Image (spheres, grey):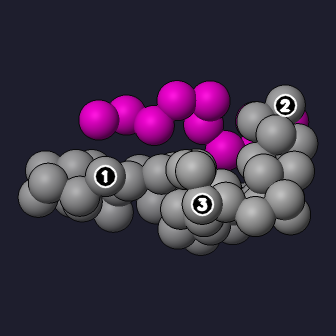
C-alpha cells in the first residue's frame, strides 16, 4: 500500500487485516524506506514524506 503524494492505495481495512494476521504494515510507505539497507533515494523520500505526512513517523508493531 503506497501513498507518497496524493491519496495512494492505502486501505485501513487491508492494514487492519494484515496486522491481525501478523504482518508488519507500513501505511503508505515502501519497506525500502525503513531499514539499514535503504539507498539514498529511499532515505530522502522517507524523510520528505515523514515531514508531509505521506508515511508514518513510526511503524506500528
Q: Answer few, some or many: residues within 10 Å of disc 3's Cα (few below 14, many 20 plus, some between 14 and 19).
A: few
Inter-mark Cα distance, 3 to 2: 21 Å
Helix, strand or loop under label 1:
loop
Q: Which dot marks residue 51? A: 2
Instruction: Give the camera-side residue of 53 and 37.
Output: 37
Verify CB contact (< 8 Å) between mark 3 and mark 1. Answer: no
Residue drawn 52% across the image and 29% down it:
58
State the SS at label 2. helix
Asked if the residues shown at circle 2 and circle 1 are in contact, with their CB atoms under 8 angstroms apart, the answer is no
Main secondary structure type of the part rendered in magenta: loop
Q: Is residue 28 visible?
A: no
Q: CA distance from mark 2 to mark 1?
A: 22 Å
Q: Position of residue 60 (x, y in %)?
A: 37, 34
**Residue on which the image places disc 1:** 24
Q: In the image, which residues are magenta?
A: 52-61
The residue shown at (31%, 52%) is 24
- Image quarter of residue 14: bottom left
Q: Is residue 1 left or right of residue 45?
A: left
* Residue situated in front as seen by the camera: 35 or 22: 35
Q: Residues within 10 Å of mark 1 (few under 14, many from 20)?
A: some
Mark carried by residue 37: 3
Among the two numbered marks 3 and 2 on one chain, the one whose residue lies closer to the N terminus: 3
Q: Position of residue 43 (x, y in %)?
A: 78, 51
Judged by depth in the image, the label closer to the viewer, 3 or 1, is: 3
Percent of width and height locating residue 34:
58, 50
Residue farthest to the front? Answer: 36
Amino acid at each position: 500500500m503506497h501513498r507518497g503524494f496524493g491519496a495512494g492505495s492505502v486501505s485501513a481495512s487491508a492494514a487492519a487485516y494484515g496486522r491481525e494476521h501478523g504482518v508488519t504494515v507500513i501505511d503508505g510507505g515502501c519497506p525500502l524506506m525503513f531499514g539499514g539497507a535503504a539507498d539514498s533515494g529511499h532515505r530522502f523520500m522517507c524523510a520528505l514524506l515523514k515531514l508531509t505526512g505521506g508515511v508514518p513517523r513510526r511503524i506500528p508493531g
